[in-house]
Amino acid sequence: MPISARLKRATEVKLAAYCEQHGVSKTDAIAKGLQLLFEFDRNAGHHPAFVAFQRIERGLQPERSRAAGKSSDAMRLAIRAKYSC
């Protein structure tokens, strides 16, 4: 389905540079960006990489403390666990 969008000049330049660097078409790059946006929205506003980290972190540390309720606390605990041998 054809769609048209107006981009600011700076955005168009960045898009063209990205496409050239990665060897993809503008259509593919825009479709990938939209897919990331939808994934971000589906994950309640959390970046997909952060959601993936949370899934991994939960698998590696089944027993979580009360302090791990906040994402920043969970990240801190995961880093401490990884680097304290």
Image: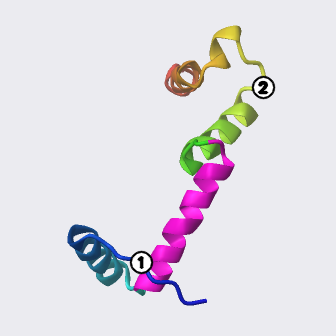
Up/down of 37 relative to 67, above or below: below
Image mark for residue 62:
2
> In the rendered image, which residue does mark 1 sit on?
5
- Asked whether the viewer can see residue 40, the reply is yes
Please tell me which residue is depicted at 45% across the width and 83% down the height of the picture: 4
Q: Amino acid at mark 1?
A: Ala
Q: CA distance from mark 1 to mark 2?
A: 46 Å
In this rendered view, identify the residue nearer to me: 74 or 46: 46
In this rendered view, identify the residue nearer to me: 7 or 46: 7
Instruction: State which mark lies toward you, 1 or 2.
Output: 1
Up/down of 57 relative to 85, above or below: below
- Compared across the picture, whether 33 is left or right of 1 comes to left
Q: Do the residues bearing badges 1 and 2 touch, measured as CB atoms within 8 Å?
A: no
Give the image location of residue 42, x and y in percent. 68, 51
Question: Which quadrant of the structure image shows residue 11?
Answer: bottom left
Give the image location of residue 77, x and y in percent. 57, 20
- Compared across the picture, whether 65 is left or right of 70 comes to right
In this rendered view, identify the residue nearer to me: 24 or 74: 24
Question: Which quadrant of the structure image shows residue 54?
Answer: top right
Per the picture, the main secondary structure of the magenta-coloured stretch is helix
